[in-house]
Amino acid sequence: MKIAISTDGEFVSPHFGRCPTFTIAEVENGEILNTEEITNPGHHPGFLPEFLSERGVRCIICGGMGRRAQSLFTEKGIEPFFTGGRVDEVLKKFAKGELERGTSECQPGAGRGYGVEKGECEHPEERETHE
C-alpha cells in the first residue's frame, strides 16, 4: 500500500495542505519497501487528492484537515489518518499496524484559501512557536 505523510522537516505536518513536502512510502506485510520525499505542488480544493491518487496513494497521514478535504480524499479512495510525531517513527508504526489514530486538529473554517481569507488553524505546535 502506498501512503503519503504530510511532512515538515522530520515531523508530521499539522495541516496536510500547508506542508512543505510529502513523504510517500510503500508498505507491505509490516515492512517499509521504499520512501521518497516530494515537494508539495500546491493546495487548492480537490487538487491534492487527485495528485496523490494518481501516484497510487491509499492513505494520507497528517495532523489535520477540514471536513471537505476529508470527503475529497475519501472520494478518491484515500483514507485520512490523523496523528503527529516524527515521520520515521510514524512510518514504522503504520507499517506494523501499531499507529494510533487520532482526530483532526483542524477546526471548521480555520483554513486559508478558497478565494476568501480565513483565520489560521489553531494547532498546539503552531501556537507554541508563534508566542
Image (cartoon, rainbow, N blue to C red):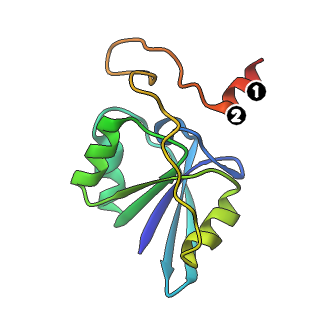
**Which amino acid type corresponds to the residue marked 2 in the rendered image?**
Glu
Side (left or right) of 56 relative to 9: left
CA–CA distance between discs 1 and 2? 5 Å
Residue at image position (74%, 20%) is 130
Q: Secondary structure at mark 2?
A: helix
Q: Is residue 49 above or below residue 54?
A: above
- Compared to residue 50, the image places residue 1 above or below, namely below
Q: Residue furthest left?
A: 75
Q: Quadrant of the N terminus?
A: bottom left
Q: Circle 2 is placed at which residue position?
A: 125
Residue 104 in percent (x, y) is at 48, 42
Across and down, in percent, residue 102 comes to 53, 51
Disc 1 crowd, CA 10 A, few/some/many (<14, 14-19, 20+)? few
Residue 52's quadrant in the figure? bottom left
Q: Give residue 118's position: percent from left, percent from top.
A: 43, 14
Which residue is drawn at the image coordinates 32% and 15% (left, top)?
115
* Front-most of residues 36 and 113: 113
Q: Is the residue under label 2 in contact with that under label 1 (CB below 8 Å)?
A: yes
Q: Position of residue 43 (x, y in %)?
A: 40, 34
SS type, badge 1:
helix
53, above or below 27, in the image: above
Q: Is residue 53 above or below residue 62?
A: below
Q: Residue lying furthest top in this view?
A: 117
Q: Residues within 10 Å of mark 2 (few under 14, many from 20)?
A: few
Would residue 92 be found to the left or right of residue 51 on screen?
right
Nearer to me, 119 or 108: 108
For the point 43% across and 70% down, the residue is: 2
Number of the label disc, if any, that sits on residue 100: none
Quick one: quadrant of the C terminus? top right
Disc 1 target residue: 128
Amino acid type of the residue that numbered disc 1 sits on in the rendered structure? Glu
